[in-house]
Image (spheres, helix red, strand yellow):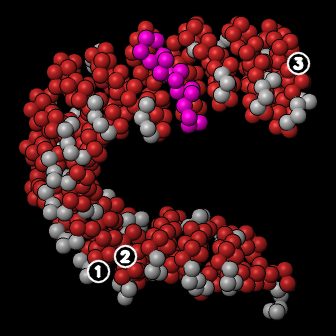
Amino acid sequence: MEPGYTMEDIAPIAVLMDELRSEDVQLRLNAIHSIPTIALALGPDRARDELVPFLQDSVDDEDEVLLALAKELGRNFEEYIGGKQFAHVLLGPLENLSAVEETLVRDKAAESIAKIAEVLSTPQIEEFYIPLLKRLSQGEWFTSRTSSAALYPPVYNKVSWSIQEDLRKGFAALGADDTPMVRRAAAKWLGPFLKNLSKQHVLSDGLPIYRRLQSDDQDSVRLLTVEDLIVIAKQLTPPEVKEQLLKQIRHSIADKSWRVRYMAATHFNELAEAVGTELVREELIGQYVQLLKDNEAEVRTAAAGQIPGFSKLLEKEVILARIVPCVRDLSHDASQHVRAALANHISGLAPLLGRDATIEHLLPLFLHLLKDEFPDVRLNVISKLETVNGVIDIELLSDSLLPAIIELAEDKSWRVRQAIIEYIPLLATQLGKPFFDEQLGNLCMSWLGDTVFSIRESATINLKKLTEVFGVDWAKVQIVPKVMGMGQHPNYLYRMTTVQAITTIAPSLNLAIVQAEIIGPLLQLAEDPIPNIRFNVAKSLEVLATTYGNTTEGREFVRKSIVPVLEQQKTDSDADVRYFAARALQKASADMLG
């Protein structure tokens, strides 16, 4: 043992060394996660002089362990080694991790280096970070060169003019690398890098890198340049965009690879906003129509998602002349995914077209999509009816809406049934009470008897929301009698649903209704032969007690009607019933005293 060190001083690092050499991966992982604690025990000087070099030298072959290390070093670890002025010490182990084979580890290491860059001073960056960046950028293995691309943006604005020039050259070299993976990383990080450049350097250095990557022979590189194009366009004036980028815009939108066209379609609105209205009118409308008519369903799906956003940039006449015909074609598209995407976004056109044009052009398409054979298409139309309702009277849709809702309500997939239940309160608000009672009331009740528990649960939540929409008096007539009636059903699932529905709906009702309509049948169920129902009654009574036990009248109701039953349930033969009854009594007593 070295002189001056006690056993306690040596222990933390020795334990860590042993655990990191263990064959058990979980033990090694735990050791990595305990690094901050060990650093704290060692103190800043020893953490810096012993722990960090040890971590730099320890090579693990398990990616999971390396990933954990890369994460830990990026979590403000400089605080354990003496603060910001020593943060550069952490770059050593992270540099090693930036060159490993596993992408996840490299990406996390680069992310941690970028975080450390935020706290480094300019002298630290120039003395320690820039040399590291050069080593990675010129590394023999493509892995380190790939990692280096992410490390240019964080420091560009923190260094001197001459070093900035070196960084622009270094990034250009990555964009022209022989390995596609490196060029892909350059394409991914070019946008963030260019955001730091002056306009002059975007034109002199950024554009050549972008053009080279945009015409790369690998589509995996080209597709990443769509976002770079948007960054550049935002930094230029519309005439400069037209002069410098028009060719590339056309190439990306009409690329031979559908994956590139898909990226262009996905980001189309951002691109349109970046290039300015003149170019949108002259060029992009035609390009967008091409994407809406693309051979690949994935591209048409992505383009359909941009319809309302792009249309906001156009005059109403142009939407009617150029976009609506495409929308009409898409509503009959062979791909259900395209139709579903259209159904999700078509309603966004209604506010742009106004009442008359919506009735003439969009209403037939809504009605057509509501009859689609694919449930997701019908669901998407219904979920977005709120937008349409602000423009036209929803009753124009009601004749088609009802069959669509009823069909979805009976769909064989329970997820579809659940989704339509969740839209019912919204529809109720829009359709009004008389229409709802006549057409949808019984449907809402029928869900309470569904074979799937999630549906029955959603149905009870739906009734609570409807009570909030239409009011307590409506619920007293339309909901409460039907729910309580199910409590007499021979099938215990129906009786259980009654109890659960009361638990959910009761807080939205009032004491008078609870006393007159609910408490009697509920107390009968407290003696049900099925223990599951009895303990759910205890839970329900607890909700009633906590909801209504805060007024004099309510406390009297709890004391007379609820407490005696819970006292009785406390001696039930079933342990669960006894537990929930005791818990409910405790809550009820606390509320009554409160």
Q: Mark 3 or 2 closer to N-term?
A: 2
Q: Which residue is mark 1?
A: 179
Nearer the observer, 77 or 101: 101
Q: Residue furthest front?
A: 490
Residue 488 image position (x, y, % from top left): 68, 19
Label 1 residue SS = loop
Along the horizontal axis of the image, is 256 left or right of 392?
Answer: left
Q: Are marks 3 and 1 in contact (CB under 8 Å)?
A: no
Along the horizontal axis of the image, is 273 left or right of 62?
Answer: left
Residue drawn 48% across and 29% down?
421
Q: Which residue is mark 2?
A: 146
Along the horizontal axis of the image, is 470 left or right of 306?
Answer: right
Residue drawn 16% across and 25% down?
361
Q: Is residue 260 above or below residue 276?
A: below
Q: Which residue is mark 3?
A: 564
Q: Which residues are magenta?
A: 437-453
* Callout 1 crowding tier (Cα within 10 Å): few <14, some 14–19, many ≥20: some
* Dominant secondary structure, magenta: helix
Residue drawn 65% across and 28% down?
491
